[in-house]
Image (cartoon, helix red, strand yellow):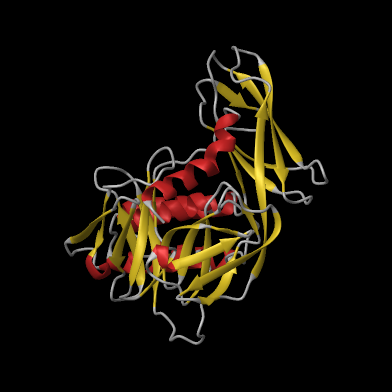
């Protein structure tokens, strides 16, 4: 797939949101396969602030997972992707974009010996959005993103990042909606098909801007399933509008043939507004919350004063909102990236792995 074809695929996936003037936010990001195989190659990608693959971006990470060693740097090619080699030992790899706050993390695992002649899909979310990337966990994948041929809903999908154990994939905007099959082909050998539900989110608003004090509504319609689904709405222009349910909120669609949800808005000052609305996929195996709590307590007991305060906040966050684990994971990853003392870091890493379901 050429760089031009990659760009067209990404832009097409985002088009429905832009047309409604409530675009899905695609914040700049480093995309790593969530699982890497020890000492084996992999492919990462970098997206810019508009969600487009970014060529010429420099990404750095520690040599062989050693925080004290000089960093390895790779630069994305014309497709916005770069090859690299995973550390020679298991643990956590944290990649950074120098000069920015962007970082991403992946779990480095001992790869099991090949047990099947074809790639195997072990896990993928049962509900996927046409406009959003998703992860495939498995084995027998290629470290070269373009060598993995992923088919979803009867159409080839775009592989953004890859390792032998995981793929990050973006659906083709022409893919069928509803119950569809996903397969991964490597070297002419194809995985067994996995059934997933692929949905499209259609966002509409009667107005593109609100005056101060004026009220409005954005409607989100889900096509591809009649089952109620959970969505996350995020206010991207808080200086212009407010959301009745909070700047970031979870909403549930009605279900049925006309499967939709409504988001109430109010104007704060004149001007166009923007919302991010994305599907919240059903959880595939929730982490053990008690094990997570115990791991954080274990880390807290050896934490030096500055780290103890932050770990205490993590425990409070887990206690107050146990269903919203993304911010918790992000904070743990930030802490690990800051290279805390060795024993504390080791115990904190245990909590991080529990969050990943390891």
Asked if residue 16 shows in the view, the reply is yes
Position of 181 compared to 4: left or right? right
Kindly identify the residue that appears in the image at 59 percent across and 18 percent down.
209
Q: Between residues 72 and 19, which one lies in front from this camera angle?
A: 19
> Can you give x and y, in whole percent of width and height, for residue 166 in the image?
46, 68
Q: Between residues 281 and 178, which one lies in front from this camera angle?
A: 178
Position of 74 compared to 256: left or right? left
> Can you give x and y, in whole percent of width and height, for residue 250 in the image?
65, 42
> Can you give x and y, in whole percent of width and height, for residue 168 in the image?
47, 59
Q: Among all residues in the image, which is located at the extreme left? A: 70
Position of 24 compared to 345: left or right? right
Q: In which quarter of the image is residue 352?
A: bottom left
Position of 107 compared to 275: left or right? left
Q: Between residues 292 and 213, which one lies in front from this camera angle?
A: 213
Residue 177 versus residue 220 in the image, above or below: below
Kindly identify the residue that appears in the image at 71 percent across and 43 percent down.
222
Q: In which quarter of the image is residue 87?
A: bottom left
> Can you give x and y, in whole percent of width and height, for residue 276 in the image?
56, 36
Kindly identify the residue that appears in the image at 53 percent across and 64 percent down.
150
């Amino acid at each position: 797939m050429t760089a031009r074809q990659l760009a067209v695929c990404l832009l097409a996936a985002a088009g429905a949101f832009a047309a409604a003037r409530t675009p899905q936010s695609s914040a700049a990001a480093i995309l790593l396969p969530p699982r890497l195989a020890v000492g084996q190659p992999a492919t990462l990608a970098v997206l810019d602030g508009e969600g487009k693959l970014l060529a010429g971006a420099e990404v750095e990470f520690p040599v062989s997972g050693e925080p004290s060693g000089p960093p390895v740097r790779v630069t994305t090619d014309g497709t916005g992707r770069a090859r690299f080699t995973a550390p020679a030992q298991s643990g956590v790899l944290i990649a950074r974009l120098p000069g920015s706050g962007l970082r991403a993390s992946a779990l480095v695992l001992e790869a099991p010996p090949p047990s099947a002649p074809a790639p195997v899909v072990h896990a993928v979310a049962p509900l996927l959005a046409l406009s959003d990337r998703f992860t495939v966990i498995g084995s027998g994948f290629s470290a070269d993103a373009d060598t993995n041929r992923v088919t979803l809903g009867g159409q080839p999908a775009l592989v953004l990042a890859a390792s032998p154990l995981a793929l990050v994939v973006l659906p083709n905007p022409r893919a069928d909606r509803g119950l569809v099959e996903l397969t991964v082909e490597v070297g002419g050998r194809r995985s067994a098909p996995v059934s997933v539900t692929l949905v499209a989110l259609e966002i509409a608003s009667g107005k593109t801007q609100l005056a101060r004090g004026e009220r409005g509504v954005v409607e989100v319609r889900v096509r591809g399933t009649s089952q109620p689904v959970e969505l996350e709405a995020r206010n991207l222009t808080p200086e212009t509008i407010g959301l009745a349910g909070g700047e970031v909120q979870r909403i549930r669609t009605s279900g049925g043939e006309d499967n939709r949800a409504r988001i109430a808005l109010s104007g704060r000052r004149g001007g166009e507004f923007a919302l991010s609305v994305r599907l919240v996929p059903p959880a595939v195996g929730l982490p053990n919350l008690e094990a997570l709590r115990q791991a954080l307590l274990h880390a807290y007991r050896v934490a030096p004063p500055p780290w103890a305060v932050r770990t205490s906040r993590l425990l409070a966050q887990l206690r107050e909102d146990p269903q919203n684990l993304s911010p918790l994971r992000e904070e743990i990853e930030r802490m690990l990236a800051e290279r805390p003392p060795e024993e504390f870091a080791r115990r904190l890493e245990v909590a991080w792995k529990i969050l990943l379901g390891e």
